[in-house]
Image (spheres, rainbow, N blue to C red):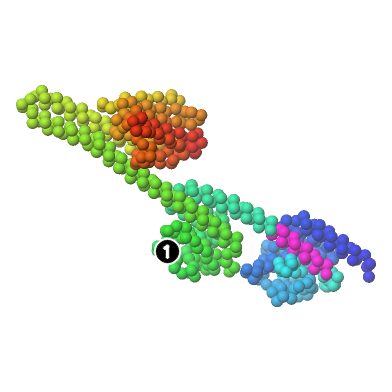
Amino acid sequence: MDERAPLRRSDALRRVAEALNETLDAEAAIAALLPELEGVLGLRTAWAFRYRPERSDFVKIAATGLPPALAANGQQALEEDSCECQRRFHAGQLDQAVNMVTCSRLRDAQGDKEGLVLHASVPLRRGEHMLGILNVAAPGTAHFDQESLALLSAVGSQFAVALGRAESHAAAAHRARQLEALADVARLMLDARDPAGILRSAVSLGAARLGIPRLAAVRRRDGQVFAFAAQDGAHPRRRAALASKEALLFPKSRAQLRQAVSEEETLLAETPSAGGFDLPERAMFDALAAHLQSALAAARRQEELRESAVLKERQRIAADLHDAVSQRLFAAVLNLHAARLGAGLEPQAASQQVATAEQQLRLAQTELRTLARTLLLEAPPDIGAALQDLVSAFSVGTGPRIESRIASRLPHLAPAAAQAILRVAQEALHNALRHAGAKTVEVDLSVQRGAVVLRVRDDGTGFAEAAGTGAGLGSMRARAAAVGADILIRSRPGAGTSVRLRLPEEAREEGER
């Protein structure tokens, strides 16, 4: 008997522990075993299976030193559904390392086996939890003795600890990648802006970036599939039976998750895996649904605001047509009618009435052009020139004096920002001329500390700020908020009104991007 054998085995076990402590994945762990055990046990080959209790099956996680017969075709011999060691594991008969004399994998493998005939199977146990099986083999027909099997059982316990640590590290890294992908998906969903685009984006990105096997957005009222994506190319049925929790949308799916993301849509996730969705996958689906719900609510709120703004704009245009253009046309008609009646009796008076009608028609024409210009407003190449044109259009007739101070060098603005500034100026001028009875209006446009600043001040009747909630003032505030600008409206009875809009540099740059 070799008296030094126990010492060599103890030393080998110590070196195995040190080698495993430095590994962070199963492949590295199993590769670290053989160099330390070859000298004492003659081991040259090892492979390991991880048990998946949620699916009641095994998956190969690592292999090293395989002979050509086992390594051929992508290690296909190790991918077979079951073997004797796995059968014993399921039967609860693999609680310590054992010699596996009959190995179907070695028996059935075709090609060079490099002298491998049998192997030892070692349970991978961490506490009370069985993690899997470690198989080790050496050339020849000699069985492992009891001392060798005891050493392998100790090695199996150490390998199980390393495997658990590696899986925890991999799970943490996977979770970090998923969270990063989820943040990207949430950002890209918002880029779509409209609800339909957000839904399509969430479905396609959820499948591609988050790894959800099958995903679909379904209309709640009729079960119609609005958008879908499947990693395996599967196509859903035309309608989903949302009333039944057991009904599956995709053929051959085994499990389903569903979450209502709005009053109109439901998000469905399905998988063809027999084990269904695990807890991390459920958590990722719930997070995606929550982000989608928020994005849809924000998009629909923006739609409501846009529709409200359009309605208010139509109401303002109708008021402009009635208060100005319609009244001028009506007055012109009256003057022309009076001129026609008095043409034979008082030619001079009739001529004066015709001249007055002509003036009223010209003013009505000017007002219509101004109104058309504001409706067709696009991003002007020069915001200063565009604002000066607007001021000039409001300066016709016998209205108040309008003084403008516009900086000669102004930055280029994004279309939405330019529209907002000009529309706010238009609304402020409209209020000063039509409602405030102002004698003087001042319009300033300048750059202050990188921000574009618009000011419109009048000396009109003013109003109590508590009452400043009309459609025109609301429209100005909404336009400013839409482009990230600040707006301050100050007024008091008898002291005029001041409107100040400030577009910060960062908002201007964001609009250009």
The mark tally for this picture is 1
Q: Quadrant of residue 129?
A: bottom right
Looking at numbered disc 1 in the image, what kind of residue is underneath it?
Answer: Gly
Whether residue 165 is in magenta: the answer is yes
Q: Residue at x 56, y 56 (%)?
A: 210
Residue marked by disc 1: 223
Q: Toward the viewer: 82 or 486?
A: 486
**Number of other residues with Cα within 10 Å of mark 1, as a class: few under 14, some 14 to 19, many 20 or more:** some
Relative to 394, 208 lies left or right: right
Can you give x and y, in whole percent of width and height, for residue 203 in the image?
A: 50, 56
Q: Residue at x 47, y 28 (%)?
A: 447
Residue 177 is left or right of residue 319, and the answer is right
Q: Residue at x 54, y 56 (%)?
A: 287
- 100 falls in the magenta region: no
Q: Measured from the top left, where is residue 219 in percent x and y? A: 42, 60
Does residue 257 appear anywhere in the picture? yes
Magenta: predominant secondary structure element?
helix
The reply, left or right, for residue 227 in relation to residue 395 is: right
Q: Quadrant of residue 475?
A: top left
Q: The N terminus appears in which quarter of the rendering?
A: bottom right
Q: Which residues are magenta?
A: 150-167
Q: Is residue 379 above or below residue 284?
A: above
- Which is nearer the eye, 494 or 298? 494
**Residue reaching furthest to the left:** 345
Q: Position of residue 91 (x, y in %)?
A: 70, 76
Q: Position of residue 144 (x, y in %)?
A: 83, 71
